[in-house]
Image (cartoon, helix red, strand yellow):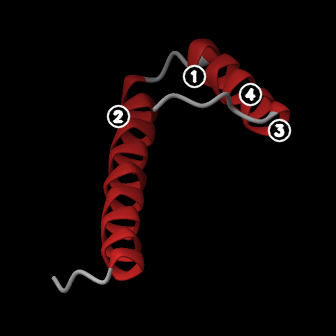
Amino acid sequence: MQTSLSLNRQFSIAMHSRAIDSCNDIEELRKVAKTLLSAWQHQAEFSEHYGAQLLGIRK
């Protein structure tokens, strides 16, 4: 299932993509990458937990 992102989310992606593209500091890029990785995993955990809750599945 693929859905279109809202205009606000598209803008956010474009803005952050430009910030990443303009960064020349490898340590700063590593920090950003680790932050994004952590946020992605937290979102996955959140989705899994509440999806299971909505379906009545115990984890």
> Foreground: 25 or 16?
16
The image position of residue 30, as x and y in percent, is 35, 34
- Residue type highlighted by circle 1: Ile
Mark 2 and mark 4: Cα distance apart in space: 23 Å
* Residue at screen point 34% across, 75% down: 55
Count residues near mark 3 (Cα–Cα under 10 Å), then give few for <14, some for 14-19, many for 20+.
Answer: few
Q: Which badge, 3 or 1, is on the more N-terminal residue?
A: 3
> Foreground: 34 or 25?
34
Which mark lies nearer to you, 2 or 3?
3
**Where, by quadrant of the figure, is residue 15 drawn?**
top right
Point out which mark residue 30 bears: 2
32 relative to 14 in the view: left or right: left
Q: Which badge, 4 or 1, is on the more N-terminal residue?
A: 4
> Foreground: 30 or 44?
44
Task: Tell me the residue that label 1 is attached to.
Answer: 20
The image position of residue 57, as x and y in percent, is 23, 80
- Residue type highlighted by circle 2: Arg
Label pair 3/4, CB-CB below 8 angstroms = yes
Q: Which badge, 1 or 2, is on the more N-terminal residue?
A: 1
Where does the C terminus fall, quadrant-wise? Answer: bottom left
- Residue type highlighted by circle 4: Gln
Point out which mark residue 8 bears: 3
Asked if 13 appears above or below 51 in the picture, the reply is above
